[in-house]
Amino acid sequence: MTHWRIKLSLFLNYFVFAILLNSVGTVILQVQNNYGVSSSSASILEAFKDLTIAIVSFVVASYITRIGYKRAMLAALALVALACLLMPQVPAFWTTKLLFAATGAGFALIKVSIFATIGLITKDSNEHASFMNFLESFFMVGVLSGYFLFSAFVDDTNPQSTAWLTVYYVLAGIALVAFLLLLSTPIDESSVQHEATKSLADDLGDMFRLAITPVVLVFVITAFVYVLMEQGIMSWLPTFNSKILRLPTSLSIEMASILAASTALGRFLAGLVLGRISWYWLLMVCLMVSAGLVLLALPLASSVDGRAVTGWGDAPIAAFIFPLIGLFIAPIYPAINSAILSSLPLRQHGPMAGLIVIFSALGGTTGSIITGHIFEAYGGQTAFYFSLVPIILLLILITIFSQMKKRVLA
């Protein structure tokens, strides 16, 4: 297999950040227990992560070829390793904010670099779409691993215990392994470096012109709405399990892994079939099934009787059914990203990746904050019923995007 070592490095880099980024739901629950912050205050952690992603992506997206994809990824891994080491040393809410800010900055560098590197190691749009889905499915494997990793360090008998912070030593070690693998992996960036001859102002101008292209504008709105929905669910699922379904804290975190597992499986399966069927019709079917699952699962949550739950075997059925939405929303993000990237020349992959990261980050922050405020004001069931709104918007936006993309490429 060609480029296997580069692909392995990209997988591991994504794995590290998958655990850190998507630990926000677990950490939201824990900071409420440990530091006495409210649900709406805890939701700000998503903003520290996502707004930093957006800002750093904006700054580096048009300049990434000058920095170098490999150097940018190495800097990102070093940054999060240091932030992880700080967490157990200084247990406080402000340290948690700092961690997610560092994670956001690092992920901006990682994601822009990885998305741009994919164009260097794939030969056509089908291979691009397939690898993108496999990569995103491995990202969800990281998310899944994170739930079990964090729950292993949670002390159910003492909700105020900060023993769970020890997990960050493990995460710092994983980041170091990823750093060393990438450091020893050669990546040929010559095909894009020779194009980086214009001034930074010209590069920023190119990114703005790309952003206001009608098909790109519709795409970034679509990406924004998707991540708004995904992060609203993912960030608040552990709290939903704990406060609405009455599960113990560690079990609330563990059972949130069903969402990550189903999303990973959905993206893996999409990677197998997208080369054979239309991505548009696949996404339409997936969105309609997702809406059906919301309408099926949430009424079941209202019938929870409040009896003591000690393990997976006696958890309410809603805890199993609702997270299966991940199986069906899974192909959306990588499919639309691949559709836009594979239609652009290599020189525009860096700026386009930057736009993807910026609008995804803004969507993630918006989704988490909206869900947190609805959760606090109206309850968890109403907050999760809200996911029907972005599902309907995505049905419309993806249809418009697909039609515009066909006209642009015609």
Image (tube, rainbow, N blue to C red):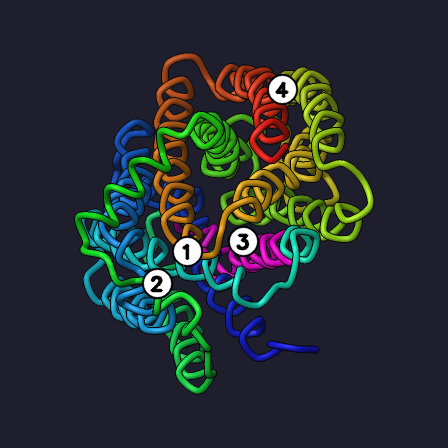
**Residue occupied by mark 1:** 347
User: Which circle's residue, 1 or 2, is located before the other in the chain?
Assistant: 2
Q: Is 50 within the magenta?
A: no
**Residue occupied by mark 3:** 143
Secondary element at tag 2: loop
User: Residue 72: image x %, image y %?
Assistant: 31, 67
Q: Is 143 within the magenta?
A: yes
- Front position in the image: 405 or 128: 405
Cβ atoms at labels 4 and 3 below 8 Å apart = no
Q: Nearer the viewer, mark 3 or mark 2?
A: 2
Residue at the far bottom in the pictured view: 184
Q: Residue at x 45, y 38 (%)?
A: 235
Q: Which residues are magenta?
A: 131-158
Q: Amino acid at mark 3?
A: Val
Q: Amino acid at mark 1?
A: Arg
Cβ atoms at labels 4 and 1 below 8 Å apart = no
Q: Mark 4 packing: few (<14 Cα in 10 Å), some, or many (20+)?
A: some
Secondary element at tag 4: helix
User: Which circle's residue, 3 or 1, is located before the other in the chain?
Assistant: 3
Look at the image and tell me whether residue 242 can be seen: no
- Give the spatial CA distance, label 3 vs label 1: 31 Å
Q: Residue at x 52, y 31 (%)?
A: 226
**Residue occupied by mark 2:** 195
User: Residue 221: image x %, image y %?
Assistant: 44, 26
Q: Residue at x 42, y 21 (%)?
A: 375
User: Which circle's residue, 4 or 2, is located before the other in the chain?
Assistant: 2
- Quarter of the rendering containing residue 384: top right
**Residue occupied by mark 4:** 395
* Tag shown at residue 84: none
